[in-house]
Image (cartoon, rainbow, N blue to C red):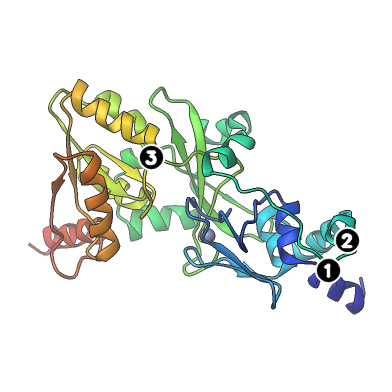
Amino acid sequence: MDRIQLQKLRDLPIEGVAERLGLRVSRHKALCPFHDDHHASLSFKVSKNTFRCFVCGASGGTIDLVMQYLHLDFLEATKWLAAIDHSPFLRPDGSKRPSAERSIDQYDAQKAFDASRYNRYFERPWLSDEARRFLFEERRLDERVVRWCRLTSWKDKQGIPWLQSPYYDREGKLVGVQNRNLIKGATPRFRFPSGSQCSIYNLPVVNLLRPGETLFIAEGCSDCWSLLSAGHKAIAIPSATLLSKKDVNLLQALSSELSVRYEMWPDRDEPGERLFMQLKEVLPALEHHQLPPGCKDYSEYYLSKLRGQASG
Ligand SMILES: [Zn+2]
């Protein structure tokens, strides 16, 4: 492919390419496919023909979007772009294609998660050296927790190591998968297969709760693993987003059926406190724990306690 052809692919309207990939673009924004997004964090800059997510940091042009979204290398992505039918982009009057406004529920419903494709990965979890380093050396998690959570790992075509966390519903049915990039500072940091329902993490733990027992609510998987490794029962909710009505109903039902007590160590920052206040509105008995200075989240606190034990 020569330079002129490549430039043509780079100049394809970025929003048109995004729509071709199945994203719903509205007012130059879309739900970010590279993290568990509920707020249309992905924006398009039409003047520069680029995209950028302000939450996970994914960014680039048309070719990057295709590479990242479809897991293709550069050449494959250019071939994909060259092969698609470009006619819908080229409206004779130059007007923007109408794009339907859709709610998040409709968005989720249109792409079903294919659990049969992913189930087998979690039947025999495998941890690469990178994953073991991250989980056991950096995060110092308990092996039993890693096994319980069925964490596994894989490498993509570019050799990037990913940690894969399955999301199960209360009955143990696989409903979503989170992929975490194990290279520090790399973007995108998270990826979710189509249709993944990654709302409440570690839901099967609620089946082990005894009446009146405490269930900790963490912000994100990492803090949940640390809480579990510290011997607590814990679930996680997606970071800084509101829960769906269905999730709230489930949490409220647990508190009335089993008189579950909810406790939380909010991140030591404004979004952490805001999330606590939002949860407290729907779970009024939610108890607040204060992280000590120098610990921005529970994982850091967990590590500092382990260090304290080692030195003391
Ligand atoms: Zn994102």
Ranked by sequence position, the earlier of labels 3 and 1 is: 1
Q: Left or right of 195: which side holds 219? A: left
Classify mark 3: helix, strand or loop: loop
Of 204 and 257, the residue lying toward us: 257
Residue 142 at x, y percent in the picture: 29, 45
Residue marked by disc 1: 9
User: Residue, x 62% and y 64% (percent of image)?
Assistant: 28
Identified by mark 2, the residue type is: Ala
Question: Does label 2 point to a residue whose CB lies under 8 Å from ligand 1?
Answer: no
Tag 1: amino acid: Leu
Q: Residue furthest left?
A: 312
Q: Position of residue 64 (x, y in %)?
A: 69, 66
Checking the image for residue 82, the label placed there is 2
Give the SS element for disc 1.
helix
Image quadrant where one finds the C terminus: bottom left
Whether 66 is drawn above or below 175: the answer is: below
Q: What residue type is disc 3 on?
A: Tyr
Q: Residue at x 16, y 40 (%)?
A: 284
